[in-house]
Amino acid sequence: MKERATYCRVCEPSCGLIAQVEDGELTGLKPDQEHPVTKGFACNKGLAGLELHRDPDRCNSPERRRADGSFEQISWQTAIAEIAERVREIDAKHGQSAFGSYIGNPMAFNALGGPATGSFLRQLGAQHNFSSGTQDCTNKFAGSEGVYGTSTCHPIPDFDHTDYLLVLGSNPQVSRMSFVSIADPMGRLKAIKARGGTVRYVNSRTIESASNEGEVVLVRPDSDVYLLAAMLCEIADSNRMDPAVVDAHGTHMDELLAFVRQYPAERVAGVVGLSAEGIRALAREFADAESASATMSTGLNMGRQGTIAYWLTQMLVFVTGNLDRRGGNLYSTGFYPDAPRSGRRDSRKDFFESQWGRIRRIRGSLPGNLIADAIHAPEEPMRALFVVSGNPILTIGGESRMREAFKKLELVVTVDLYRNATGQLADYVLPATDGFERHDVNLCGLGLQHQPFVQVAEPVVSARGERKPEWWIFAKLEQALGYRSILDKTDTPPLFSRIDHMLSRIGLSTEEVKQAKSQTVALGALEPGGFYESVIQTEDGRVDCCPGYFREEGAIDRVEMIFKEMLAEPDDQLKLISKREPSMHNSWFQNLPKVRGRNNREPKLWMHPEDAEVRGLNAGERVRVGNENGEIEVELALDAGLARGAAALPHGGGNANTPALRFASEEPGANANALLPSGPGSFEPISCQAFMTGIPIEVSPA
């Protein structure tokens, strides 16, 4: 048996793994105990890679849809030639405006696949480009652009030194954190408490991460913006700001103060679900800590005002003097110090008038919630769609609208590990390699690493069947269409030339990294200093405490409009929130028996016992969950740890019409996203971020 160093490609930490290989087959995975950074930590997601690699339901050959809806295997030569011919026909008939794409989450963890996909789409002239980022994180790009002048600046908590950590809308025990690259996050959080520090979780349910009930600050769904504004108001009015830092490095502070003072604790208490004194106490606790840090995740990202929430979180750290300070939030430079400059962006240039009103592109993406509308558009509709490592049929709000819209597409091509729910509607399904069959670099964690490092991964086994890496697939399509291709002059292109250019900034190359233990080079630990001088990319080089485009594009006025809506809601209004479960991390894990284990049942709707009682509902019975967007039936479960008015439903159901995923389709469960809005008005205008939590629902006996 041979052992090869590799790493997990599921989330930001990129935990080191050891692949065990016998006779050319991957037979085992274990944590890399000698990895210089992750040091033997790996969670169930990374270790599930073995089952993912060996799943008999994986797509191993190109597939073509027959007229009756079934699929047949074809050769790569046939698939590439036929897709190219269909592209030429559509281009000749409708022009470049007919083409679109949807790029899923796994592409963020594929250092070679992303650029290759982008090269193809640029030469294709695709106009309708969407990504899963607008379902989980584009609010952070928009907020960072406004506050720091670049989409690539996201200071993270100094876990090893902070005295106080505020965790908003995140459940690290289950998710392992997002926009923070750190192995064993729960170990770090426990260490904060062990040395006498404080960890507070702001959430709408008592999450698994909390070791005692007092650590969780329960708030009503989608109310975090008002909590943060009230905290900032209290900090300002009680003279707890750091005037030296604010005066030296901030601008538009008067505008920030005018905004937050509209939302004092007394005014927002009822909407947030906390007492005014409780809000003030939380603010004072944060400001008075010797050092304090904060991080927020999808629980806030996916609300109606994710960008505003991210802005105010940054302000909470900045005005208390905790930005670029030991124990506060630090910027992680990583192996590419030019990242802030490369992400420099004036967001005003991205907005334009469309047939759906005023919208924007963010990092090249349109709002994913407009896919169905783009297909149905009366002017220049999308007629061909390339889907790469994504499953928009189940993951975009409004499943029924999406399925209906897909019927109008003249060409759908998916590049993925499986023929998933979206692939089931495709004309061609092209099999991609997994992380153990391709070359890679841990690029995704750049700028987010608690301990910066770079790791190169090579294929530990040959690709099963006829699986191919995305860079090869799109290079072949480019050749067939007469575009420029990295395969034009050689069958073995220099795959890492872009990465080598980035690494050269710190005097490294991928070849040198390969020679290191675990093919990993650990870089210097995070240190405060230099952030204000070299990272910020605003025109004046200062932190923008109230970005002008927030007001210009209506986001500031929208805060008050939504607040008044929430004030007017009935006291018994139920709102749907997401619930992360270890067995349901990503849609491409839904077919793995060992991951789903004993939880291989349909997702349940969790409600507070008192909310269930007033509706005459009992645990274990089937209930109807509905709103103007859709209706599903699920089993009810009770959880006294939920905030009143919050109802939690895990994602991961909906595979009733996905026969290629045999295990996932046995007990498919209901798709929570069928209850989500789609189309114009269903996303935050300044970030394209879909509204996916805090969704009003009604629950009644099925």
Image: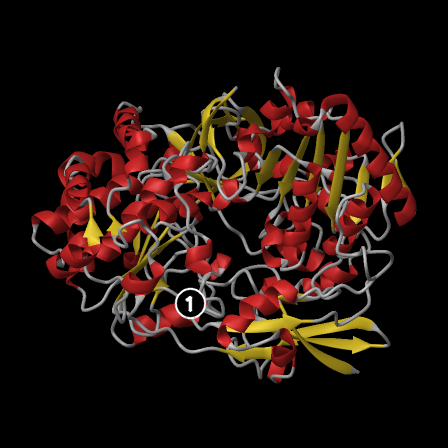
Q: Residue at x 31, y 36 (%)?
A: 550
Instruction: Tell me residue 92's x, y (percent).
Output: 78, 25
Q: Is residue 318 left or right of residue 102?
A: left
Q: Is residue 224 left or right of residue 382?
A: left
Q: Residue at x 33, y 38 (%)?
A: 644
For label 1, the residue is: 333
- Quarter-wise, where is residue 196 in the image? bottom left
Instruction: Tell me residue 72's x, y (percent).
Output: 91, 40
Q: Is residue 408 visible?
A: no
Instruction: Tell me residue 468's x, y (percent).
Output: 80, 56
Q: Is residue 47 visible?
A: yes
Q: Which is nearer the eye, 345 or 204?
A: 345
Q: Residues within 10 Å of mark 1 (few under 14, many from 20)?
A: many
Instruction: Tell me residue 509's x, y (percent).
Output: 60, 75
Q: Which is nearer the eye, 360 or 695?
A: 360
In the displayed structure, 386 sits above or below 629; it is below
Q: Is residue 201 left or right of residue 94?
A: left
Q: Residue at x 50, y 50 (%)?
A: 580
Quadrant into which the N terminus falls:
bottom right
Judging from the image, what secondary structure is the residue with disc 1 in? loop
Q: Which is nearer the eye, 541 or 637?
A: 541
Please name the amino acid that badge 1 sits on. Thr
